Amino acid sequence: TCPEWPQCPNGMMPSAEYFVEWTHRLVAATVGVLVISTMVASIIHKNSDLKIKITSSLATGLVITQITLGALVIDLKLHAVLVSIHLGIGIFLFSMVLLTTLFAFRIAKMPLKAKI
């Protein structure tokens, strides 16, 4: 793993030995931006369904927790308990993103009268 956080050695483009970890961080950062954007959009949009607001807000809290735990995991040299917690929260985060997506598609397919 990359011994530093948030970047790997050699800055933005690390050596080949850190490529997998660097890719993980890039994907995680992208997911974080998308999750937070979804939550902001659901709150700003007045007609947004409550289920979407709740699941996207939970996902945002979990993303922030994941970022914090990710930094701690690196700083504490992959402590097994923190790694396990980090993975568990990742699964919960995935479930909130999945629920948000399912609610959004389910609501989008409902007839107009059912939405009102």
Image (cartoon, grey):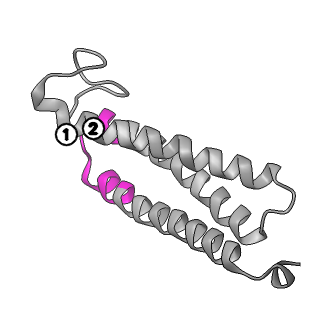
Q: Amino acid at mark 2?
A: Thr
Residue furthest out toward the top: 10
Q: Is residue 16 magenta?
A: no
Give the label on residue 47, or none: none
Left-right relation of 68 to 4: right
**Dot 2: few (<14), some (14–19), or many (≥20) neighbours within 10 Å?**
few
What separation in Å lies between label 2 and label 1 (alpha carbons)?
5 Å
Left-right relation of 85 to 19: right
Q: Is residue 82 magenta?
A: yes
Residue interval drawn in magenta: 73-86
- Residue shown at the point (57%, 57%) measured from the top left: 59
Figure quadrant of the C terminus: bottom right
Q: Amino acid at mark 1?
A: Val
Q: Are marks 2 and 1 in contact (CB under 8 Å)?
A: yes
What kind of element bears circle 1? helix
- Residue shown at the point (77%, 82%) measured from the top left: 111
Q: Main secondary structure of the magenta part?
A: helix
Residue at label 2? 23
- Residue shown at the point (74%, 55%) measured from the top left: 42
